[in-house]
Every structure is written in structure tokens, then in C-alpha cells.
Image (tube, rainbow, N blue to C red):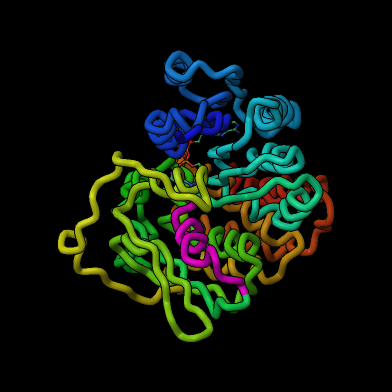
Amino acid sequence: MTVLAAPKGVAVLGSTGSIGTTALRVLDRQRERFRVTALTANSNATLLREQARKFSPSFVGMVESQGDGDEEWKSGTEALVAAATRNDVDIVLNAIVGAAGLDATLAALEGGKRVALANKETLVIAGDLVRQACASGAGEVVPVDSEHSAILQCITGHPTAQVRRVVLTASGGPFRDWSAERLASATVEDALRHPTWRMGRKITIDSATLANKALEVIEAHFLFGLPYERIDVVVHPQSIVHSFVEFIDGSVLAQMSVPTMEIPVLYALTHPERVADEGVPAFDPVKISPMTYEAVNHERFPALRLGIAAGKAGGAAPAVFNAANECAVAAFLAGKIRFPDISRGIASALDKLSGMPADTREQLLAADATARRHVKEMFGC
Ligand code: NAD
Ligand code: MG
């Protein structure tokens, strides 16, 4: 007779977003293994109420929007931390967008939880603090991001010393074949038209500038302890191969699937196990062919190189890169700046602020706030 373990409690932070709703679809199919015990969102209260009725969690938090003032930041963060540290929560699925997800990640790790991390910004701002929180609290980070899930799936069972390098794939976004002149007048609508993934607005713009891939290179550095020289990026417009791992003997493993976040979300919950899920579309090699690859064009997409340089510089630079990007993307989405201004804002903030102190959470948040102010002043918004 098989005795099933009690279902694991899952907190979904950002449950009304793209990853949050994807996760709830997956969790709905896995009710024997997982129970949704906490939900939080800061938008779409109607959907949050519906989700609460369907999953009956013991904690529901409608988090106030994070503004520029310290108070709003606090109230939002406190509710997220409360959800992430509950006794009936074993796994925290952090699907918040941006720096607002940092404290919940740290608190969950210090409380010994698994953090299924979609909120890559957490690792970019404070990768070292996340490592320390894992060490002191015995928690663990398992990536939700499809590229990092792919790498994890390929290296599980192999020591990192056997990895020669990893190659993250990038779709290239909606502007892959646009000229620099055309990019100068790209509209918000153009930038939101992603060719292969349906995602939240912020990450969709990050995919158009390739800032998303820069965040992911830094994320890979901290997750897998690899130096930046051993992390490469290649453009793969079909988004079928989610990343490559090249081993020291020259053999290369890749993880593939149709582009759906349901697979990496489920794997982040079950790693290193795999469990049956009939909900995802079948894989058909004929339908997905051809698969193509091309080099990144750094001249047209400077945000990638800026982000990798910030990662290599370390200290406050990754936090500055992230905050300047978040602020510039918000300004672009609000119609206040042009598309190329996003990377101009990032470059200027990095130039001025990379040397800020970065040893503690408070210093990193100060660098974050200063970078946001810098970008706002630069564009008068
Ligand atoms: P989204 O905008 O669709 O959803 C964000 C969710 O978080 C919403 O429920 C929103 O209410 C909540 N939220 C946003 N700001 C908040 C705040 N300050 N306090 C509390 N709650 C807040 O975003 P998304 O596309 O689901 O992305 C979430 C994270 O996952 C991002 O870090 C993104 O980079 C990452 N990610 C997303 C995808 C994807 O396919 N969407 C893929 C890989 C990684
Ligand atoms: Mg990704």
C-alpha cells in the first residue's frame, strides 16, 4: 500500500499575475501533493477573491501598491513577509515583480522554506544576502525562470566542477530584426508584442530590451556559483531549448519543451523529483522545427552588456542596474520616455552610482532608491 505524504503548503506571492495564475493552474491539478495555504496580490482584487474561494487558503493578503514613499513599501513588504513565514507554508512561490519581492525571499529562506523563485530581481539586488540567508536558515532557492530551470534539470546529479559553461537562450524579443533607427520610435504597444511568451508588462519590456537576459545572467551566477566568463547567451527565436549546459568532456545537454511556464513552475515545486502532469501540450519535434540560433546584437540591445558588466563589477552595481531599469521601464510604459532611453537611463545610473556601499540590505535598498531618483531626475519624470 502506498501512503502519500501530507500535501505541502504553498504560498503564492503575486497570485493574480502571469506566473501566479500559471502556478494556480498547476497547483489545481496537483491537489494531492500541494495545498495553497497563502495568496497575496496587489492588483485585481476580484480575481484574488475568486482564487481565495477556489483554494480556501488560511491567509489572503491584498498588498498595497509599492510607491516611492517608505511607508507604502513597508506595508506591502510586511504582508508578503507574513505570508512567506507562516507555519503552514513549506514552499513560497515568489511571483512578485521587482525589488518588492526581496524581503519575502530573505524571510522565507531564514525560516527554512523552499523558495520557488520567479522574482529574479531578488537575486540580482542581493545575491550574496540570499546565499547567507540560505546558509543561516537552511532554506533553498529553486528557480522558476525557464532558463534556470533548464540548467538545474541538466546539472542535477553532476558537480558544478564538471560544468564548462552554460548558454542561456533568449527569444530576441519583438525587436530582434529591427534597425536602430526603427527602434528609436518603437511604441509601448510594439514592445508588448512578444513573439513567444505571454507575460507581465515589466518582463515583456525587459525581453524587448534584453535587460531580462542580463538579469538572468546575474541570476545564473548566484544560483549555480558560476563565474560570468562561463555564462553565455544565444538568441533562439523559437523558445524551445530553454538553455544548454556544456560539460568538461565537451558533451552538451539541453532541456526542451513547448514554451509554457507550467513546466518550470511544477519542477520548482517538486525538484529533484518529477511528477506526472497531463495538463501541458504534447511535444512534437516535427511541429517545432526548424530551431535556429544567432548571436546577440549588442549594438542594438546595449542593456544586456550593461547588465553583465554590472554583474562582473559586483557591489551595488547589480542593484543599481535593476532599480534604474525598473524605473525606466515604468516611465516607458507610462509614455514618458522613448525605448532607447531605457538603456541610456541604466548606463547613466551605473556610471554615477555603482560605487555605493553594498554590504547590507539597508545599503542595497539605499542604492536602489538613489538609482530610481537618478533616472527620474534625468528624464524629469
Ligand atoms: P505580473 O505583473 O503579471 O504579476 C505580478 C504579480 O505580483 C501580480 O499578482 C501583482 O499584483 C503582484 N505584485 C506586483 N508588485 C507587487 C508589490 N509591490 N507588492 C505586492 N505584490 C505585487 O508579473 P509576472 O510576469 O508574473 O512576473 C513575476 C516575476 O516572475 C517577475 O520577476 C518576472 O521577471 C518573473 N518571470 C516571469 C515569467 C513569465 O512568464 N511571466 C517568466 C520568468 C520569470
Ligand atoms: Mg526567463
Question: In which quadrant is the N terminus drawn?
Answer: top left
Q: Position of residue 221 (x, y in %)?
A: 62, 65
Instruction: State which region is magenta.
Output: 145-160
Q: Position of residue 309 (x, y in %)?
A: 63, 71
Q: Position of residue 121 (x, y in %)?
A: 60, 49
Question: Does residue 171 show up magenta in the picture?
Answer: no
Residue 25 visible in image: yes
Question: Residue at 75% across / 26% down in the picture?
Answer: 71
Q: Nearer the viewer, residue 313 or 163?
A: 163
Question: In which quadrant is the C terminus drawn?
Answer: top right
Residue placed furthest toward the front: 1
Question: Residue at 79% across / 64% down in the picture?
Answer: 355
| Whether residue 246 is situated above or below residue 122 in the rendered picture | below
Question: Residue at 45% across / 60% down in the picture?
Answer: 150
Question: Residue at 46% across / 44% down in the picture?
Answer: 265
Left or right position of 76 against 192: right
